[in-house]
Image (cartoon, rainbow, N blue to C red):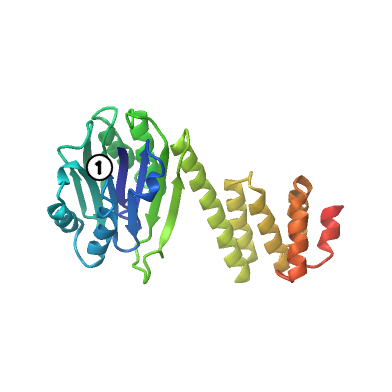
Amino acid sequence: MTYSIVARDEKTGEMGVAVQSHYFSVGSAVPWARAGVGAVATQATLDVRYGPLGIEMMSGGMTAKRALTSLLEADVKPEVRQVAMVDAQGEVAAHTGEKCIPCAGHATGNGFSCQGNIMENHRVWGAMRRAFEGERGSPLPERLLAALDAAQAEGGDLRGKQSAALLVVGPELKPNHWEGRLFELRVEDHPEPLVELRRLLRYQRGYRWVDRGDDLLSSDRPEEALDAYTKGMGLVPEERELKYWVAIGLLSSGKDRRRGLRMLKEVCSKDSNWVRVTEGLLKIGQPKLEPSILRHVRE
């Protein structure tokens, strides 16, 4: 009772799943992925086992097609399942059982598969395929969300909208299954789940840039750090906490005290609780801050 897309980016090797449904917390059941292995979307009359078992089989060396075939052969009700998989080599496998509730179907392309069931019409998965192919050159998360937007524009889930999720992993196999997750975002219950999912993606990109700035600052590359900080704050200008921690980073490193004080004062002037947070940081002596900064933010 869902529409989704699984895909591998042919340039970066990243793999991911994006999904939307009129079903609470769809992200807890449909999308599965592991870095360097593959991605799975399992839906319709849901059998969650297709997700972890599909990942396990591909991790053991099976192709997406072989893994899906094996799982379908072992299933007592394959006719009610809808599943799609993509492996680290870009091979795609998809299945829409003949007893999935209509409108149901899927459309595959080079390294991706789009699928849906209980859709408004049979045009949904084709619209998803065209949207994904039309965004070639864009980052994989944006391409996946473009496919979801196209599905919704074509009518989407017959029952309406409720939840959505995005899961993207990197191309390199990691020792632990939870490592290598580049984006893992869920909208559990929202009147506009796709709009909210894009907002969360924007936030995560903003925080990623700030994390990158922290790494650059600790490596004594202040100008590059400031550039990363600027990009991050530019993506989420409404988020005071992001600006606060950038200010603290600048002050504790001593790289740009004037800018750090200006930013800290701006945040604290809008919400005095950040003054109390700063007091707490000074009490524990971390990060390395001068006690005099409190005088500046209180002026």
Q: Residues within 10 Å of mark 1 (few under 14, many from 20)?
A: some
From the viewer's perspective, is 42 left or right of 270? left
Under mark 1, the amino acid is: Thr
Residue 39 higher or lower than 189, as above or below: below
Residue found at the far front of this picture:
76
Is 5 located above or below residue 217 in the figure?
A: above
Residue 235 coordinates in the image, percent (x, y) = 57, 47
Between 198 and 142, which is closer to the camera in this rendering?
A: 198
Q: Residue at x 76, y 49 (%)?
A: 266
Q: Position of residue 184 (x, y in %)?
A: 43, 53
* Residue sitting at the far left: 73
Which residue is label 1 attached to? 45
User: Which residue is more in the foreground, 170 or 188?
Assistant: 188
SS state under label 1: loop
Q: Is residue 143 left or right of residue 284?
A: left
What's the residue at 56%, 54% (across, down)? 207
In the rendered image, the vertical position of residue 271 relative to residue 194, given as above or below: below
Q: Position of residue 275 (x, y in %)?
A: 78, 55
Give percent across and percent down for residue 252: 72, 67
* Residue 286 can be seen, yes or no: yes
Q: Quadrant of residue 66?
A: bottom left
Q: Nearer the viewer, residue 93 or 51?
A: 51
Q: Residue 133, located in which quarter of the rendered image?
A: top left
